[in-house]
Image (spheres, rainbow, N blue to C red):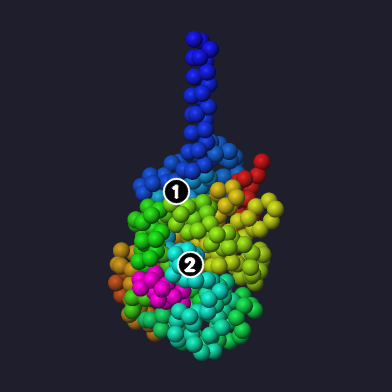
Amino acid sequence: MKHVLNMNIIFLVFITLIFSISISASYFPGKNTWLSVSPEEEGVSPEKVNRLLDLSFSDDATQAVVIIKNGKIISERYAEGYDISSHGTSWSMAKSYYAALIGISLDRGEIESLDDKVSDYLEYFNDGRSKITIRDLLDMSSGLNFPSHEHEKMFFQPNHLAYAKKVGVEKNAGLKFEYNNVNSMLLGDILFQVTGKKADVLFEERILQIIGIEDYKLWKDEKGNVMTYCCVDMSARDYSKIGLLFSRNGNWDDQQIISKEFIDETFQVVWETPSRFTDYKRYYSLHWWVSKYDNESKIFNTSGKFGQYTFVDRENDIVVTRISKYSQQDSGSIQKWGIMKYLRWAGIENAIAIGRKLIESGSIESGSDVITPFTEEEGESYEFYIKYPEIIDAIADLSRD
């Protein structure tokens, strides 16, 4: 009898252990709940976590950092005046989100291949642009006209899609990486042609609702075109949920949202990118950046203007989000430029500087006279870029023995 009892106890301990391992490996946050544990519980050194947090917050522009291991929050920190519900704006991190919708359309047979010609879907590409493929758009190698402002002037236009449609070809596709916002804006039109739905609706239905993100803003231009190259407002935790979806190979709580095949194709090195904010060598693939790719670890990331990032170390199931300070607006999600429309010819940096001065002086009021995503000077990163190599090393260090 005693022997049987002992065997039962051993069996129960074994089942409990297996169950605990299974839960740890497959944990997903709920809509309004997210398990927070100590770093030690997930096998991560607190000192390594604190190093990453301290490096990130050495830049006063930092609003929030969230660190995820095995789906659980092992640490998060917020600047004074901000908390877990405070929104950031993604800027170009949105490119990676809307690119995921292309992957989903590919999975569903709405798009046959990434190597299809864009002209198969957009009739107005049946001109000098007819050889450009969907992959060329995603890899930023379309050869479309590429001015020094990278088509950031599109942001100040009343109709971003009309602007994008008119951009002509400059060189053969597939020959050179050029970070061009027009590539991303055109993806939204492809999605509309194959689904009959705008990209914001698809994003809600095919990703956000499934992974439990409810508090967000998806920006559109004055004509109602979804800005598929820019500007999704949500909390640092919710950006991290999207990162976790990619870390888990497109699967969310046993539902395959994006195929693992598309994630695998995304998480590779295609282009070495020219230096921009930092001399640190980075790469690019299908609208994702690659910040580290070696035998030790492979760290991919979304990236947005002024220092918005979600880093994904898929092999170690680590997600890190860092966003900069942002003044959340409660005035809708459709741009309105008002008198600031005249700044669109001043050049990007001049337009930003003048706009900030007009708002600071009270000459115009953000949220009424002008409605648009807007990062004030306090949210413009500097030290974060300088310390970028150290920050990437600190993320890699989270999984080192």
Q: Residue at x 49, y 55 (%)?
A: 250
Write down the quadrant of residue 43 in the picture.
top right
What is the chief secondary structure element of the magenta stretch?
A: helix
The percent position of residue 237, horizontal first and vertical second, equals 44, 52
Mark pair 1, 2: CA separation: 20 Å
The percent position of residue 244, horizontal first and vertical second, equals 49, 52
Above or below — where is 360 with respect to 389? below
Q: Residue at x 53, y 12 (%)?
A: 3
Span shown in magenta = 185-199
Q: In the image, what residue type sits under mark 2?
A: Leu
Above or below — where is 40 with respect to 206? above
Left or right: where 241 falls relative to 271: left
Q: In the image, what residue type sits under mark 1?
A: Asp
Q: Which mark is residue 106?
A: 2
Q: Earlier in the sequence, mark 1 or mark 2?
A: 2
Residue corresponding to mark 1? 254
